[in-house]
Image (tube, rainbow, N blue to C red):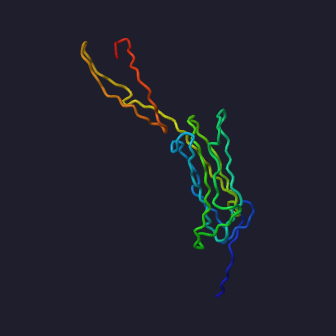
């Protein structure tokens, strides 16, 4: 009986050699959706992206970048989405989870709520020595907060009401949006039929 052992290799996306012992980057979450309504206006919210290594050798995270451009016509005193802290100095090495490591690189993303009802997008780029994924992109969306007032029910039918009689119905105002609604007053208007 002849036993032949070998090392599995193949070419990575960037031409790097991939082996069973290659580092393998894992990023959670793969897409980051931030809700502007989770912070008060002009306050800062915090979200974290975690990088681990599921491969067989040390993962070197070489660079972390966040690209963000404000929407056209929007003035921001502070970028709505920006890079916060990275839990280690770059470049940094992350041991393999398979080696019993709990090494995690934490990348903090900061976001600010502006009450202009405009969604914002950014892109987090993480560069490493993973031959299969030398650059990982994490799309980031900051979902705008906007109030949306709904009247329930939308139509009120009081039926036939005789002259001199009154009829009434309850109407509920409900906020179906993601920001607070401020109601400063109300006004009933009379139509040609004398509704008040």
Residue ID at (47%, 36%): 180
Vertical placement of 176 versus 193: above or below? Answer: below
Q: Going by the picture, which residue comes out furthest to the bottom?
A: 1
- When asked about the image quadrant of residue 160, the answer is top left
> Residue 67 at x, y = what percent?
68, 47
Residue ID at (69%, 61%): 89
Vertical placement of 135 versus 162: above or below? Answer: below
> Residue 37 at x, y = what percent?
51, 42
> Residue 2 at x, y = what percent?
66, 86
- When asked about the image quadrant of residue 42, the answer is top right
Residue ID at (46%, 31%): 182
User: Which residue is more in the foreground, 103 or 184?
Assistant: 184
Disc tally is 0
Residue ID at (68%, 66%): 93
Q: Quadrant of the C terminus?
A: top left
Left or right of 127? Residue 31 is left
> Residue 191 at x, y = what percent?
38, 14
Q: Going by the picture, which residue comes out furthest to the right?
A: 15
Q: Quadrant of the N terminus?
A: bottom right
User: Which residue is more in the foreground, 70 or 139?
Assistant: 70
């Amino acid at each position: 009986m002849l036993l032949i052992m070998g090392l599995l290799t193949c070419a990575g996306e960037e031409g790097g050699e991939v082996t069973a012992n290659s580092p393998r980057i894992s990023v959670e979450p793969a897409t980051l959706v931030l809700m502007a309504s989770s912070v008060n206006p002009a306050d800062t919210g915090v979200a974290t992206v975690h990088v681990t290594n599921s491969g067989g050798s040390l993962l070197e995270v070489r660079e972390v970048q966040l690209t963000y451009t404000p929407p056209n016509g929007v003035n921001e005193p502070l970028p709505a989405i920006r890079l916060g802290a990275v839990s280690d100095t770059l470049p940094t090495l992350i041991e393999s989870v398979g080696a019993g490591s709990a090494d995690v690189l934490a990348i903090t993303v900061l976001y600010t709520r502006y009450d202009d009802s405009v969604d914002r997008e950014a892109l987090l780029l993480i560069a490493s020595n993973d031959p299969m994924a030398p650059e990982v992109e994490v799309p980031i969306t900051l979902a705008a907060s906007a109030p949306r007032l709904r009247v329930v029910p939308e139509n009120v039918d009081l039926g036939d009401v005789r002259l001199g009689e009154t009829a009434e119905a309850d109407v509920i105002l409900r906020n179906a949006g993601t920001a607070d609604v401020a109601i400063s007053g109300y006004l009933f208007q009379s139509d040609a039929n004398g509704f008040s």
